[in-house]
Amino acid sequence: MLDNSEVLIEGAESIANEYSYNFSTEEKMFIKIKYMSYLIQRISKYYMAVQVGLDDPFIKEQLKFSVKTFDNELTHLKSYDYDGQSHINLIALEEYWLTTKALFSTLNERKLPNVIYISSGHLEDLLEKLKLYHSKNQ
């Protein structure tokens, strides 16, 4: 199932690259936030796969890669000049991500599926608020 989802993702990326155009800054940020939400789901999926006993090196590699990619995307997101409540949401996202990322790094030490589920949901909620900000500014 994990392999099939990766094939679907690769196919979607291929189609997206073939039919792309120049996005505005707001559209780029909107897409980036959508991608970050996808990364949270992907990280959670791989974390849960390891927790249920799938001790595949590919899964662990993809988990680490997705965490690093989320870090990079968050760095780019922080370069955007948010104001008011959106700036507060960005700060909360950054702080919460640092805590959640630390939980993901305890892959072999602890089993925290409920905490990961709740943390992932909170991160996605914060990303949704930022996505809404960009959808209104398009």
Image (cartoon, helix red, strand yellow):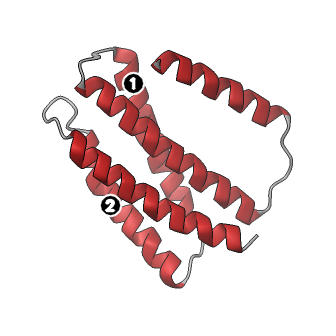
Q: State the CA–CA distance, disc 1 to disc 2.
A: 23 Å
Name the residue at the left extreme: 109
Residue, disc 2: 96
Considering the numbered disc 1 on the image, is that residue within a helix, a strand or a loop?
A: helix
The residue depicted at 26 percent of the width and 55 percent of the height is 99
Residue, disc 1: 61
Q: Is residue 99 left or right of residue 97?
A: left
Lower position in the chain sequence, tag 1 or tag 2 = 1
Q: Is residue 75 left or right of residue 30?
A: left
The residue depicted at 43 percent of the width and 77 percent of the height is 88
Q: Is residue 4 above or below residue 73?
A: above
Circle 1 crowding by C-alpha within 10 Å: few under 14, some 14–19, many from 20: few
Circle 2 crowding by C-alpha within 10 Å: few under 14, some 14–19, many from 20: some
Q: Amino acid at mark 1?
A: Glu
Q: Amino acid at mark 2?
A: Tyr
The residue depicted at 70 percent of the width and 24 percent of the height is 11
Q: Is residue 5 visible to us here?
A: yes
Q: Nearer the viewer, mark 1 or mark 2?
A: 2
